[in-house]
């Protein structure tokens, strides 16, 4: 673990200098530590760390996508997902036969080429801030459909006994258990989000540490449920996150889980690189290049046809296909199980691994530059398809933080002072946004509210602080007030800060804070005014 962390840290710094996506850096780090230097060998512990990262990643996706957002793209995800699997499998099978592979080998290669990587797609969309975009939600929906197809394939594979045929009873029971389990988990997630989770999490939200532990407990409880029904842990983690997404604490949870997920996912990609065995790679180089090109070019074209034909704009269709233009971690699993049962040889496993690493690396660049690629291809006239005629050029809208907020007053800290300020500002006709980490303190306030800590820049971005009219802090936390004053000044928004301890006044003045609410000084002034009005003082 230490070797992986140090190597990844050094290579990420180098990769950033040449604008290399972090995922590619981690894969190269794994190849360097494993096949090249032989410093790292994988055991069960590292595998567990990798799986934990995938679970946390899908948990974060669930936190982003509430039921209403998933329902919005349900039809296109289901139909597009199943059609894509069918078309890519058929084309991949034909291409594999043409490259000289046998019937069974071509069948498994076609399966491996069909699926896209949930980890890669979600990680890069999350980094781009586009996971809530229309094409991002469609892509995530398609990935979930692919997960269901993988479960079916794994069930069939489990029912195969080497070359002795198929155990129909085992396959039937496995499918019944899987789909029954899926229905049960979805029902549990929906019922829990409405009746079971709100009150306990409302109490837990008063302490960020308790909220995080409870959320992770719920995540892994759902993962256990998924394992019990023979489903992938991605499904359980996603449903756990989606059930919590219905609560008002999802953004706070995302910020706390995100650093954990980043570390575990880094280990996942490093271990992926460590696993690769390059012995005999030169023999299969031609087949690897051909199949990788098929995935990188074929998938965007297939999705352009399917999603474009369903009435979506060409940009949405293209970005969805480009985002899913790689093979999946499930491809390695399927090929490994098939090889273990003697259905395919080692050369197919090698090709699957090489195509996987190659497409993941190249598609990472493509996803990062997706909008630029679309603009370039549009300029070349590459989207002149008859079924796209008359369709709008852009139907996608990237949801940006702070959407709909402008010329508003942000009030941070809902203590007695903060609540009173919000009420009086609203009474004066100002648009306000109240921010606090405790959901109870936000209840009953006029105007809009936001749950989260302003220590995180992402919360301020969601509050639309760059477009605010004024930022007010009623907090008594010196470090947070200093940071808020600095960030306000950096975007040119005036701020007013509450001062309890007079020793911090000089610091805030150095930060060019526009107005200081000094309770002790204001209190003395109020007393003097009252005493003068009473005639006690001249």
Image: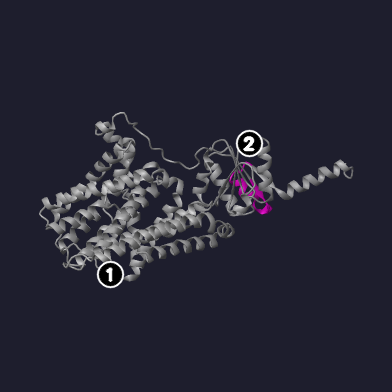
Residue position for label 1: 41
Residue 265 point in image, percent of width and height: 36, 59
Residue 306, numbered label: none
Q: Looking at the image, is mark 1 or mark 2 earlier in the sequence?
A: 1
Residue 292 point in image, percent of width and height: 20, 50
Viewer can see residue 485 = yes
Using residue 5 as the reference point, say whether residue 281 is left or right of it: left
Instruction: State whether residue 69 is above or below residue 147.
Output: above
Q: Is residue 508 magenta?
A: yes
Q: Give the quadrant of residue 29.
A: bottom left
Residue 392 point in image, percent of width and height: 35, 31
Question: Residue at position x 59%, y 59% from top?
Answer: 203
Residue position for label 2: 430
Q: Residues within 10 Å of mark 2 (few under 14, many from 20)?
A: some
SS class of the residue under badge 2?
A: loop
Instruction: State whether residue 373 is above or below residue 358.
Output: above
Question: Residue at position x 28%, y 55% from top?
Answer: 328
Q: Is residue 203 magenta?
A: no
SS class of the residue under badge 1?
A: loop
Q: Which residues are magenta?
A: 497-514
Give the quarter of the figure containing the C terminus: top right
């Amino acid at each position: 673990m230490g070797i992986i962390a140090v190597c990844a840290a050094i290579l990420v710094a180098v990769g950033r200098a040449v604008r290399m996506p972090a995922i590619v850096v981690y894969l190269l780090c794994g190849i360097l530590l494993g096949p090249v230097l032989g410093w790292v060998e994988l055991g069960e512990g590292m595998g567990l760390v990798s799986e934990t990262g995938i679970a946390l990643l899908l948990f974060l996706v669930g936190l982003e996508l509430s039921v209403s957002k998933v329902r919005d793209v349900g039809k296109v995800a289901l139909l597009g997902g199943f059609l894509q699997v069918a078309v890519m499998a058929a084309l991949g099978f034909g291409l594999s036969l043409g490259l000289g592979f046998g019937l069974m080998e071509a069948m498994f290669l076609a399966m491996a080429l069909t699926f896209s990587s949930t980890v890669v797609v979600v990680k890069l969309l999350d980094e781009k801030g586009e996971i809530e975009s229309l094409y991002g939600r469609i892509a995530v929906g398609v990935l979930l459909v692919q997960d269901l197809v993988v479960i079916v394939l794994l069930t069939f594979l489990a029912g195969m006994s080497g070359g002795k045929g198929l155990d129909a009873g085992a396959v039937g029971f496995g499918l019944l258990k899987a789909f029954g389990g899926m229905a049960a988990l979805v029902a549990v997630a929906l019922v829990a989000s409405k009746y079971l989770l709100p009150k306990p999490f409302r109490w837990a939200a008063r302490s960020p540490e308790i909220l995080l532990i409870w959320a992770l407990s719920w995540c892994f409880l759902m993962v256990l449920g998924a394992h019990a029904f023979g489903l992938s842990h991605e499904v359980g983690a996603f449903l756990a996150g989606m059930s919590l997404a219905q609560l008002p604490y999802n953004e706070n949870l995302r910020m706390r889980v995100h650093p954990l997920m980043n570390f575990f996912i880094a280990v996942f990609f490093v271990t992926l690189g460590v696993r690769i065995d390059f012995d005999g790679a030169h023999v299969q180089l031609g087949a690897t290049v051909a199949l990788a090109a098929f995935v990188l070019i074929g998938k965007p074209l297939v999705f352009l046809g399917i999603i474009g034909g369903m009435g979506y704009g060409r940009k949405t269709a293209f970005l969805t296909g480009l985002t899913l233009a790689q093979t999946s971690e499930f491809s390695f699993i399927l090929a490994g199980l098939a090889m273990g049962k003697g259905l395919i040889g080692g050369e197919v496993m090698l090709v699957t691994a090489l195509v996987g690493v190659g497409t993941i690396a190249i598609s990472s660049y493509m996803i990062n530059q997706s909008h630029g690629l679309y603009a370039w291809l549009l300029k070349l006239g590459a989207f002149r398809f008859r079924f796209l005629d008359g369709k709008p050029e852009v139907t996608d809208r990237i949801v940006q933080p702070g959407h709909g907020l402008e010329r508003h007053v942000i009030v941070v800290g809902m203590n007695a002072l903060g609540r009173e300020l919000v009420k009086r500002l609203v009474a004066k006709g100002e648009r306000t946004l109240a921010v606090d980490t405790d959901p109870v303190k936000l209840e009953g306030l006029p105007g809009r509210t936001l749950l989260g800590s302003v220590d995180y820049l992402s919360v301020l971005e969601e509050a639309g602080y760059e477009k605010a009219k004024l930022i007010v802090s009623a907090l008594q936390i010196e470090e947070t007030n200093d940071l808020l004053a600095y960030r306000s000044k950096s975007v040119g928004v005036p701020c007013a800060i509450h001062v309890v301890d007079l020793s911090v006044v000089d610091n805030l003045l150095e930060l060019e804070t526009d107005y200081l609410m000094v309770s002790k000084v204001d209190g003395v002034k109020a007393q003097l005014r009252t005493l003068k009005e009473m005639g006690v003082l001249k």
